[in-house]
Image (cartoon, rainbow, N blue to C red):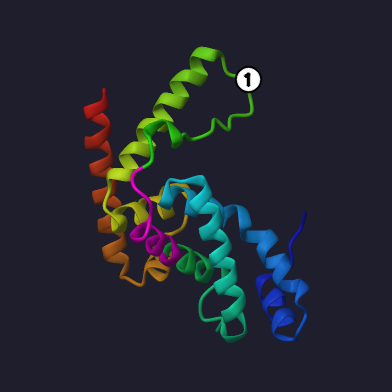
Amino acid sequence: MAFADDGDLINRFKGGELSAFEDVVRKYQDRVYNLCRYMIQDAHDAQDAAQDVFLKAYRNLKTFKPDASLYTWLYRIAVNTCLDYKKKSRPEQAEDESVIDDLTSTEPSPEQRYQSKEIGQAIQLALQKLPESLRAAIVLKEIEDLSYEEIAEVLHTSIGTVKSRVSRAREELRRLLRKKV
């Protein structure tokens, strides 16, 4: 499905066309949910957080200034919403509740699926142990594939700080994952 240009969607919404916001949600819902899922580590809470992100976006889209891209603006809202959820989150989930699905297109063998699941679980557990600032930076860089500039905009910080956080997160993930081996 081809989506309209962000600027067109914003202008249509500001002009009173509410269906334009539905298009914004359809365009970005998977990416926002995935970010929330990695930040929060709980599928149910991530779904709630993603809904909150779009509710906040809906309430504030009329005042959106195109000095930032809609994409990074939504991500900024998502990161802040996830951080709020983490502050009020439930006690730690059981380790087996946080599993990364194997999304490969070829049919792996059961052994490969098990190994992939194990690696995914190890990465998820290591991500959970990172401080929020490092986790946000590494998820936005490596999983969401944002540029350093976009991450700096989302996190309201300098590019140098983003690069430092990503570097520290990578090093900490390496250290945590080596402990598992």
Q: Can residue 126 be seen from the camera position used here?
A: yes
Image height of 178 relative to 47, above or below: above
Spot occupied by residue 122 in the image (x, y as percentages of width and height): 35, 31
Residue depicted at 41% across the width and 25% down the height: 118
Q: Which structural element holds mark 1?
A: loop
**Split into 4 quadrants, where in the image is the N terminus?**
bottom right
As drawn, is 73 to the left or to the right of 15?
left
Magenta-highlighted residues: 80-92
- Does the stretch in magenta take in 88? yes
Magenta-drawn stretch contains 75: no
Q: Main secondary structure of the magenta part?
A: helix
Q: How far from the left and from the top, in percent, is residue 147?
A: 44, 59
The x, y position of residue 133, in whole percent, is: 30, 59
Between residue 168 and residue 122, name the one nearer to us: 122
| Residue named by callout 1 | 107
Query: Would you call the spot at circle 1 few (<14 residues within 10 Å), some (14-19), or many (20 or more)?
Result: few
- Say above or below: 83 vs 124: below
Q: Is residue 59 above or below residue 180?
A: below
**Residue at (37, 33) in percent of width and height:** 95
Quadrant of the rendered structure where residue 76 is? bottom left
Q: Kindly identify the residue that appears in the image at 52 percent across and 48 percent down.
A: 44
Please state which amino acid type lies under the numbered disc 1: Glu
| Residue 145 visible to the viewer | no
Tell which of 161 and 58 is nearer to you: 58
Q: Quadrant of residue 170?
A: top left
